[in-house]
Amino acid sequence: MSKRPYIVGNWKMHGTRAMLAEARAIDRGAERLTKVEVAIAPPFTLIHAVRKEAELMGVGAQDVHPAEGGAHTGDVSAAMVKDAGADFTIVGHSERRADHGESNARVLEKAKAALAAGLNLIVCVGETEEERDAGKAEAVVSRQLSGSLPTGEELAEKITVAYEPVWAIGTGRTPTVDDVAAMHRHIRAKLVAIYGEAGAGVRILYGGSVKPDNAAELLSADEVGGALVGGASLTAESFLGIVIAAADLPRDH
Ligand code: 13P
């Protein structure tokens, strides 16, 4: 894989200005570890402040509303997060799909709005435990990809896919490396079907209980281009442990 590994911290609903010191320390680490592309998606309220700390790392949002603006109390548009300093947004995280009933169609609307505002995208997919046990994991992920990804070969370079099995998020459980590799190969085939040759260059991140001590193993799985990290991204010490594991991967991975 020719692109640098991409390690992204999703702070979810964590963080006040007291955490800016962690953001600063992560950014300083990113400056030393240039073999890895590093980014953080803090809550909306911290995007502007984290951007000011960021010399090198990317800064993103965790969600955007599909509309450009208007009567949507409590929502935030793609143009607003761009203006606050974001260069990408996550869409379709399973916590939003579950907590806010977001369908694939809704995620697609958000993805299109983000691209129109000039943001890059991390589109999340992943099956529940029930779906995996029923042997439906690949079918579910296929449907999520077909339904949530904007089409057009020229868009592929702006898109990253994150595979996050719902049952591995925040649980300390992870799939086996073989299962991760199998799903990532499945996603790769689907991306090539959607984007043609450009689909071969889309990075596919693994997410779900990635920690400094399992990162090397998960990141070395076939077709894994980085990680989307929740809990372990909240301190510079643990997040940089994962970035270091990515920097130490063999060059040709
Ligand atoms: P954890 O790393 O806390 O399992 O969360 C993963 C995740 O949902 C990242 O988006």
Image: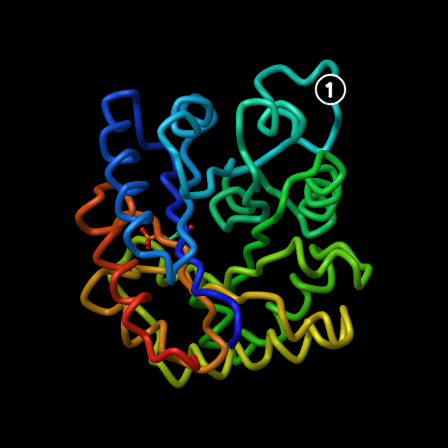
Whether residue 172 sits left or right of residue 167 in the image: it is left
58 versus 32 height, above or below? above
The image shows residue 161 at horizontal and vertical percentages of 57, 60
116 versus 200 height, above or below? above
74 versus 173 height, above or below? above
Can you tell which quarter of the image residue 172 is in?
A: bottom left
Which colouring convention does the figure follow?
rainbow
The image shows residue 62 at horizontal and vertical percentages of 50, 38
The image shows residue 151 at horizontal and vertical percentages of 80, 59
Q: Amino acid at mark 1?
A: Gly
As helix, strand or loop, the secondary structure at mark 1 comes to loop
Q: Residue at x 40, y 34 (%)?
A: 42
87 versus 181 height, above or below? above
In the image, 31 versus 81, the foreground residue is 31
Q: Residue at x 69, y 52 (%)?
A: 104
Can you tell which quarter of the image residue 24 is in?
A: top left
Q: Residue at x 35, y 53 (%)?
A: 229
Can you tell which quarter of the image residue 91 is in?
A: top right
Q: On the rendered image, what quadrant is the C terminus found in? A: bottom left
Q: What residue is shown with label 1?
A: 69
Tell me how many marks there are.
1
In the image, 117 versus 229, the foreground residue is 117
The image shows residue 200 at horizontal and vertical percentages of 65, 75
Whether residue 22 sits left or right of residue 80 in the image: it is left
Residue, far right = 152
Whether residue 137 sits left or right of residue 21 in the image: it is right
Mark 1 vs ligand 1: CB below 8 Å:
no
Which class describes the residues within 10 Å of circle 1: few (<14), some (14-19), or many (20+)?
few
Q: Residue at x 50, y 51 (%)?
A: 94
Whether residue 37 sits left or right of residue 147 in the image: it is left
